[in-house]
Amino acid sequence: MLSPSFDTAGDVPALLRSRGYAVVSPQDVAALAGCQVADLQALVPSWDDLPPDTYLKDSGRYRRRRHSCFVVEGAAVQQVPHRAHWQPVEYNALHGGMQRWFEPMRPEVAGAGAWKQLVHALARVSSDVKGDRAWYVEAHQFRIDTTDGIGRPTPEGAHRDGVDMVAVFLVAREGIKGGETRVFEADGPAGQRFTLTEPWSLLLLDDARVIHESTPIQPTAPGGHRDTLVLTYRAGGFQGG
């Protein structure tokens, strides 16, 4: 596995402007959020309670998830009424064009102080790069398991999400091989690949500049799985209105 070269928290906005992505260590993620890594780790048990994703068009049973939406305006982080996740087919050829109603995040997670600090911190970074504005945030808790042999973190392949910024956190990685992260220029040949292994390490992406994917995982021990948190930030409203 190729380990990522972590960028310092202070360099993140400039790197997003210059190359379209940054990779941040757990310690710098906590520093950005103004909390401790232990505060983020306290959220991890909720990944053991994710319902199955029943919308997979490849008939897979390898993905579990929860989904909730928030608006960040100024210092306020407000959870909005539960809504469907929707993407156009231009950004997700496999699952685009359909309303997908996932179970919401647990209230004790969405209401945790560290959670709100994390969501707000990345809104600040997004405003540093894109300009100060309200941000419409979709949060996705994922577990990709290997019960049936192979789990696919990104069954749609290399993609953009149709938003402004994308944050992908590695939350846990247990008893697996694979799961390599790949980032490519959206309009050029350059790319990087590495494997996130440290809990709460972060890949932060300018969605207009780069495309990304994660390779399939296979078990090396019973119960092998990969847990991630994906936060997307979009100006002007949620996709699908």
Image: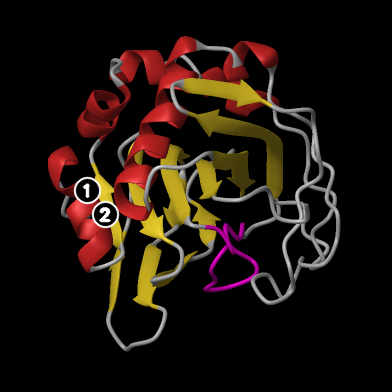
**Residue displayed at 81% across by 38% down:** 83
Q: What amino acid type should be assigned to the residue bearing mark 1?
A: Val
As rendered, which of 33 and 24 lies closer to the eye? 33
Visible residue check, residue 222: no
Q: Is residue 178 left or right of residue 60?
A: left
Range drawn in magenta: 151-163
Quadrant of the image occupied by residue 111 = top right
Residue at 64% in and 71% down = 91
- Residue 157 drawn in magenta: yes
Residue 28 occupies quadrant: top left
Position in image of residue 168 (x %, y %):
44, 47
Residue 217 in view, yes or no: yes
The N terminus sits in image quarter: bottom left
Q: Secondary structure at mark 2?
A: strand
Whether residue 46 is situated above or below residue 143 in the rendered picture? above
Q: Which mark is residue 22?
A: 2
Residue corresponding to mark 1: 12
Depth check, mark 1 against mark 2: the one in front is 1
Element on which disc 1 rests: helix
Q: Is residue 209 above or below residue 26?
A: below
Mark 1 or mark 2: which comes first in sequence? 1
Q: Residue at x 54, y 23 (%)?
A: 77
Check residue 53 for magenta coloring. no
Image x and y of residue 176, in percent: 46, 49
Q: Are marks 1 and 2 in contact (CB under 8 Å)?
A: yes
Relative image position of residue 184 (x, y in whole percent): 36, 75
